[in-house]
Image (cartoon, grey):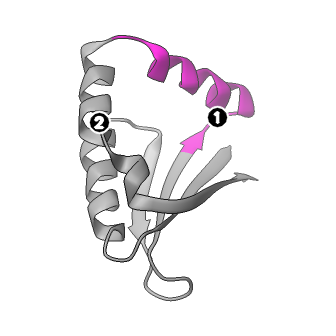
Amino acid sequence: MIIVHDIFICKPGQASKLAKKFKEAMAGMAEVTHIMTDLSGQFNKVVMVSQYASLTAWEQSFEKYKQDTDEMKKVKQVMEGYQDMYLTGSREIFQA
């Protein structure tokens, strides 16, 4: 199993707003298991956790986001402007 953490360090006051956008946009996507904000550690952090059977499955998941389906149109609409809410980001990939 592959566990992916997409990590965003947000501008002050934007972490909860970004987490809300992710929760709305990713609702119904089984691979996304958690969307979390910081309780301790670095401030203004949002972490989106997703799980995949393999690295190949993770890579293939990007193809879904490229499709012009109604689901992806909704995701793009909800996520509009999210780039303005964070300063930097990173991705961590773990094998369980």
Label 2, secondary structure: give it: loop
**Which is nearer the eye, 32 or 80?**
80
In front: label 1 or label 2? 2
Q: Is residue 53 magenta?
A: yes
Q: Is the magenta stretch mostly helix, strand or loop?
A: helix
Q: Residue farthest to the bottom?
A: 40
Residue 58 at x, y = what percent? 63, 32
Q: Residue at x 64, y 27 (%)?
A: 57
Residue 17 position by quadrant: bottom left
Label 1, secondary structure: give it: loop
Q: In which quarter of the image is the N terminus?
A: top right
* Crowd around label 1: few <14 · some 14–19 · many ≥20 (10 Å): few
Q: Give the range drawn in magenta.
A: 51-68
Q: Residue farthest to the front?
A: 84
Task: Please name the amino acid that badge 1 sits on.
Answer: Ala
Q: Name the residue under label 1.
A: 53
Question: In the image, is 76 to the left or to the right of 91?
Answer: left
Q: Is residue 4 magenta?
A: no
Up/down of 40 relative to 54, above or below: below
Q: Name the residue under label 2.
A: 28
Up/down of 54 relative to 35, above or below: above
Residue 21 at x, y = what percent? 28, 51
Up/down of 85 relative to 10, above or below: above
Question: In the image, is 35 to the left or to the right of 88?
Answer: left
Task: Please name the amino acid that badge 2 sits on.
Answer: Gly
Separation of marks 1 and 2 at Cα, in angstroms: 18 Å
Label for residue 31? Answer: none
Looking at the image, is mark 1 or mark 2 earlier in the sequence? 2
Q: Residue at x 66, y 27 (%)?
A: 59
